[in-house]
Image (spheres, grey):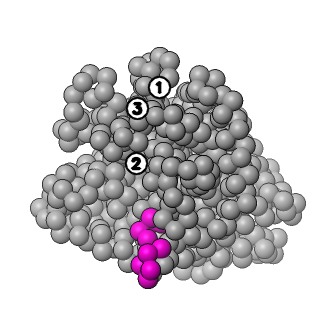
Amino acid sequence: MKKGFQIRKSVFIPLCAIYILVTLLGIIVPEAFAAAENAIVNFAAGWFGWLYQITTIVLIVICVWVLFSKKVGNIRIGGPKAKPTMSKWNWFAISLCGGIATGIVFWGIAEPITHYVEGIPGLVEGGSRLSALYALSTTYMHWGFPLYAYYCAAGILIGVCVYNLGKPYNVSSSLYPLVGDRINGGFGSFIDLLCVFGIAGGVSASLGVASMQLGSGLGQLFSFTPSPMHWFIITLAIVAVFIMSSYTGISRGVRWLSDKNAKIYIVLLIYVFFCASTKEILAMSTESMGFFAQNWIVQDTYLGVMVDGAQTSMWPTWWTINYWSFMIAYTPLTGMFLAKIAQGRTLKEFALFNFVLPGAFGMLWFAVFGSAAIYMEAGGAGIHDAMTSKGTEATVFAFFDNLPLSTILSVVFMITAFLSVVTLCDSMTTTVSSITLEGKDVASEEPPARIKIFWGIVMAALAFVNILVAGITGNTSGINATKLLAITCAFPLLFVVVAMAISCFKLLGKYAETYEREK
């Protein structure tokens, strides 16, 4: 083991046992595995859907408070003398790419097309002008500021608790303002265990999405039908590149990947803007953003009640609550990662680079790609037909078929998706490794590469087993299987994130007194 580190047995050993058990259950009794996932999802959405929605709004309030409060915003992570460790561009690129993973590259076309054609139960019928506005407005909600509010609020809280108050580099340290020194015992280990379990589900789901989308793209380019074997090979390739990146650490691997990935995002965005219906994109984007500003609260609190008489629609479960579950799964450990790379920055800078800028980029991406896709579909492009016949993962390639240089675009897009998921795996396994280790250097040094590789392989195995279960049972598509996995693993973390939000208000509201007491 690398000098300065040792295994944190209270977290590492139980997690290994849980992952082995879950993986074996998925292989041995796939039907029971899928049934258990469905039961947990129905319970979480049915009883606690309201809490998911309210939590999202509260986290946005925290980020806005930090942005506009001089007293809170001027707090510097690491103390008044701390210095930044990277340039603002690299910081932004890592924050952007670490937050969206494969999300916007996968759903940038699929989600707005789905809502435009199929409508939203209880809100709008499909195929209309109003459904186009709702489609884009909904994607702004799912992939804009609310998404990054989760990561930003967690990063602010963990950054202050760890680097200003001197608490251990663990998620449980974020609850110090609420529970005090109990974070150092069994309670803290339990919280950290839940968080690592949650992130494993989130990363595994993202790996599953990436492998299916890359398989679809390769199938289109080389004329074959993707199968679980292709997905397995793609997952192995992702893990192999991630392992190479792991040996270089954050300062080289993640920074290099994020830099290249962010630049490709920008090139793709500019290309689609000028090569699709530019005039229509400008008009639709402007109107849909106004629609979003007017209707955001209504959409954010929509739970599908009484859509069909006394029946509640499952739409919020499969869309909004699914997205919030992804965010919740990532939130604690993404917050740790973002706090680690933000030492020397003020909280106002942190909110700008982890809430405002990436949130605005997410909205811009969906405004351009979503508007262009909706105009194409309205003109008879058949993108939705391709999605229903070939799977959600094929949607973006059907979109590119309507643009110049479609084959080159598809290749560039697959490179982007590949780099996105590698960046995600690298950053998250770095944090997972840190939380399963202990020692004086955990908060400041890179964890041993072999520990990062171990957790990367574990998450890849869980991703493949989950997709395989969907194929064996035949009751769930691969994409819906990833949604089930994310919601299932993230459900216990909902209550941890709620506690973190309360802790953040308590800490920042009385920061001066708290900090002086801890010095």
Which residue occupies 87% across, 60% down? Answer: 70
- Using a 10 Å C-alpha cutoff, classify the residue at mark 3 as few (fewer than 14 neighbours), some (14 to 19) or many (20 or more): many
Vertical side of 363 occupied by 156: above or below:
below
Label 3 sits on what residue type? Answer: Ala
Residues at badges 3 and 1 in contact (C-beta under 8 Å)? yes
Vertical side of 275 occupied by 460: above or below:
below
Residue 494 image offset from top left, x and y in percent: 50, 72
Q: Which residue is mark 3?
A: 398
Disc 1 or disc 2, which is closer to the eye?
A: 1
Label 1 sits on what residue type? Answer: Asn
The residue closer to the viewer here, 250 or 300, is 300
Disc 3 or disc 2, which is closer to the eye?
A: 3
The residues bearing labels 1 and 2 have C-alpha atoms spaced at a distance of 27 Å
Left or right: where does residue 137 sit relative to residue 114? right
The residue closer to the viewer here, 321 or 233, is 321
Vertical side of 114 occupied by 519: above or below:
below
Disc assigned to residue 206: 2
Residue 106 image offset from top left, x and y in percent: 45, 41
Which SS does the magenta portion mostly show? loop
Which residue occupies 26% across, 22% down? Answer: 222
Q: Which residue is mark 1?
A: 402
Label 2: which secondary element? helix
Label 2 sits on what residue type? Answer: Ser
The residues bearing labels 3 and 2 have C-alpha atoms spaced at a distance of 21 Å
Label 1: which secondary element? loop
Residue 180 image offset from top left, x and y in percent: 61, 80
- Using a 10 Å C-alpha cutoff, classify the residue at mark 1 as few (fewer than 14 neighbours), some (14 to 19) or many (20 or more): some
| Range of magenta residues | 307-317
Where on the picture, by quarter, is residue 239? top left
